[in-house]
Image (cartoon, coloured by chain):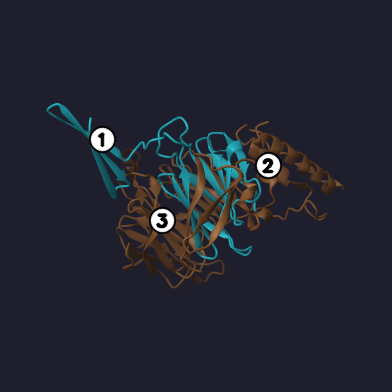
Chain colours: A cyan, B brown
Amino acid sequence: VPDPLVKVFDIGTQRQLSPMSMSVSSPNTLRYVPASSRTGDEAPSPSILLGSTTGIVQVCPLNGDMINSQLLYAPLTDRKEMMTTMAVSSSGQVMCVGTSNGGIAQYILKMPEGLKPKINEVEILVAGGNDVLCHTIYCNEKTDLTSVSYLI
Amino acid sequence: MYANNDSFENGSSRSIEYYETDPYEYAVDDLHDENNDESNFDSEPTEGMWIEHCALNYSNSPVTSLEYDSNLELLWASYGDGRVSSFAIKLDCMLEEYEQPQRYSSFTASEEPVFQLITIHSCILSVSMSAIQMHTVGGLSLGKFSTAPTGINEDGNETIFSYTCAVALRPPGALVTADSVGSTHILAGTSSNFAYIYDISVQGGDPLMIYDVCSPTVCVRSSDLHLAVAGADGKVRLLDSRLRSMQVTHTFDAHTGPVRDLCLQPDGLTMLTCGVISRPVNPFDPKSPVNVRLPVDMMLSFRCSLMNLLPLSFKRTEKSSHVSIIHYQYFTVCARSVGKGV
């Protein structure tokens, strides 16, 4: 019988904390979602993904706001299909689930308006005469570079 | 609750449902109900929530492992037929929107099912039962990284154990240099009572260290401070991630049955496990155990998970089933109230 509880341990004190659980199913897969690399008061905090073979993924914030946990449903085509695995990107903005029929569903984190990237953005100011040129470089995980220049 | 109708890559369109708070309001069977039309949903996805972006259907074999490669912006997927595929993920920096992932490479990594992928710089390691194969990102085989170790089984005969899982270790300087350094070692769990440490730079060599973990390994995870080895006996054993000792530093009694999965927070201070209860629990079966933990207990512990409250338990009586259902429904009503912010 699948254990509906997710056991939580404090490694530092080597004690077991209060467990967590999925609301409607038993968890089969656990993934840690790091805090999104955005700034702002409403930036998402770290959370835990609890995945079940039934295709349910529960997003549980680690800041204690368990009421606002979110449920996602993997797009299973039939009742025999099961969710087998999950993965979360290191940025915490993309996740995906895999199913027993070979399907992969990718989810992205919809960010609140006004939040700006905290990393991967570099501004270079170049002063020449009376003008200042602001050269902004957007870096996408070390591979894609996009730059925008404008006069201040 | 709201829905998002997305057009998928293969041309199909599915209605994806999202529940913000109370999942008890909807039955699990509704997950597969295709009759949920859009008129039932009256709001758009709120910000800070996960929304489905796309679906990738390139195989009929089960997806056994998924892994994001942050160095190369790739999503790696392994399948039950031994095939490994990668998908390029691109972010439009100006629009800050993710584009549809395109398949970058696809190759057969093993004749056996590949159930674990490890991304190291410019290489991919695919873990199957008999070996750990090494390939380039494009699919060129670099040979076997290691083969499954041999040992003496319980009957006293020499046998070949199989790999069950593996994880890449961060090097000892990772606390200082953060993500700027790559992995240097691999911890591989097997069907035997031993877990093995391999040096990534030594291909085909013997294990660097051997840990006696007292149980077949189900899952391994690593953090900056610890290596966690989850066993089929329901215990989680911690190892020193700095590889300074070959002893198990601590053992947690997590579950009565095998551990299914394990999650270590990057700070190494908190660990979460999910697993299996070894005994059958059925509150509607008169032959089930005396102390039965009902789903309402789990719901209560979930709502109060950070308040140090112990889950409730019910003493089984002759009318336990009836009592259980009353409590179950009662608490469901309570949960709805909480979910709506009352």
Instruction: Write the residue at 46% across / 30% down.
Output: A41
Residue at the spot of label 1: A123
For this view, does B308 lie left or right of residue B227? Answer: right
Please check whether the numbered discs 3 and 1 fall on a single chain. Answer: no
Residue flagged by tag 1: what amino acid is it? Glu
Residue at the spot of label 2: B299
| Image coords of residue B120 (percent x, y) | 34, 55
For this view, does B232 lie left or right of residue B70? Answer: right
Residue at the spot of label 3: B100
| Chain of the residue on which disc 3 is drawn | B
**Farthest residue in the left direction?**
A129
| Chain of the residue on which disc 2 is drawn | B
Q: Residues within 10 Å of mark 3 (few under 14, many from 20)?
A: some
Using the image as rendered, state which of residue B69 and residue B284 is in the foreground. Answer: B69
Please identify the quarter of the rendering in which residue B137 is found: bottom left
Residue flagged by tag 3: what amino acid is it? Gln
Indicate whether B162 appears above or below A53: below
| Image coords of residue A116 (percent x, y) | 38, 35
Residue A66 - label: none
| Chain of the residue on which disc 1 is drawn | A
